[in-house]
Amino acid sequence: MNPDTLLRIGRVFVVLNPHSGSFAAEVREILCRHFGDEEQGSCTIHVLDAGHDVKQLVKEAIDEGAGLVVAAGGDGTVAAVADGLIGSDVPMGILPLGTANVLARELGLPLDPDEACALLTRSRDSATLDVMRVGDRPFFTQVGVGLDSLMIRDTDTESKQRLGRIAYLWTAAKGLSGFQPRRFLLTIDDNAPRMVRASEVLVANVGTFGQPPFQWGPDIHPDDGELTVCVLRVRSLLDSIRLGINVLRGEPRRDPSTRYFKARHRVTIAMVRASNPLPVQADGEIIGETPVEVHLQAAAVRVVVPPRSEEDADAATA
């Protein structure tokens, strides 16, 4: 690591998920090239195993003087690492190695591991992001019930490794075309519950899904102190086509199949018929079944982001 970089960010602690994406096998070499090897004491790489308590690992690294904690993995790894950083002023770096990397795309981070590491060594900019909590777990991107949670549940690991993000679309095309809207009970903040009929109810902390230009809606940002509840009701092939066109145009709010609500504290999603629960996904992972309660924790974690202007970029590389 460049001595000036070491002086600026201090020791680096990396949490590496070896099962994320296709780059994981070569990531250690890339990390050492940018941050120095572990013998030099400037960078420690912790390879995750199933029994590891990520939150505790991160807290111990901070206590031992880490100035930057890097989450090397998918959105799930990023959220787990962030949990150990909440309440501290130590920033998180993201090395996106997952299938979707939604948060990295939202923040405009490089998806190439080498470029992502280079950004972490040069950028002086950070954003303070909101976090969604379900129970004792944090999530950054979205919590959803309906079409997306069924699609995630029914897409097997082999298909994801072989086809990447296309695997989810293939699952939807094969098995979910006949899915009919369900009746949900939706409670936002301290308002009375409302009954909505929907194909999907999603609590979004970021606007991105998939990749540009696909968005859940405009004006959804991970640092604005609020959540957006998206209610989608798709009843026919025509509805799906029209919604797809409006999304491609960047105008999902104009589509009659969608409704939006804002939340500043919490959102509860339940089924009118509790005996017929649906799976719940959070950051692309199935975490249980309905009902689900999502709490907003505003301004929770600092994350390294690209320089905000060309002048900042020039200054960072000077």
Image: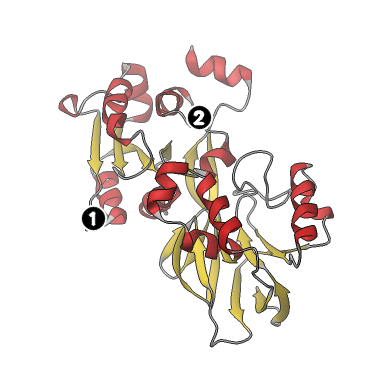
Q: Residues within 10 Å of mark 1 (few under 14, many from 20)?
A: few
Question: Under tag 2, what secondary structure?
Answer: loop
State the separation of the CA atoms marked 2 and 1.
28 Å
Number of residue marks: 2
The numbered disc on residue 140 is none
User: Observer-nearest residue: 227 or 63?
Assistant: 227
User: Observer-nearest residue: 204 or 314?
Assistant: 204
Q: Position of residue 80 (x, y in %)?
A: 38, 53
Image point (60%, 64%), residue name = 176
User: Observer-nearest residue: 277 or 47?
Assistant: 277
- Which residue bears the numbered disc 2? 110
Image point (54%, 16%), residue name = 315
Image point (23%, 35%), residue name = 44
| Res 74 visible | no
The kind of residue on which mark 2 rests is Pro
Residue 149, located in which quarter of the rendered image?
bottom right
Q: Residues within 10 Å of mark 2 (few under 14, many from 20)?
A: some
The numbered disc on residue 52 is 1
Colour logic: secondary structure
The kind of residue on which mark 1 rests is His
CB contact under 8 Å: marks 2 and 1 = no
Question: Under tag 1, what secondary structure?
Answer: loop
Q: Position of residue 39 (x, y in %)?
A: 15, 26
Of labels 2 and 1, earlier in sequence is 1
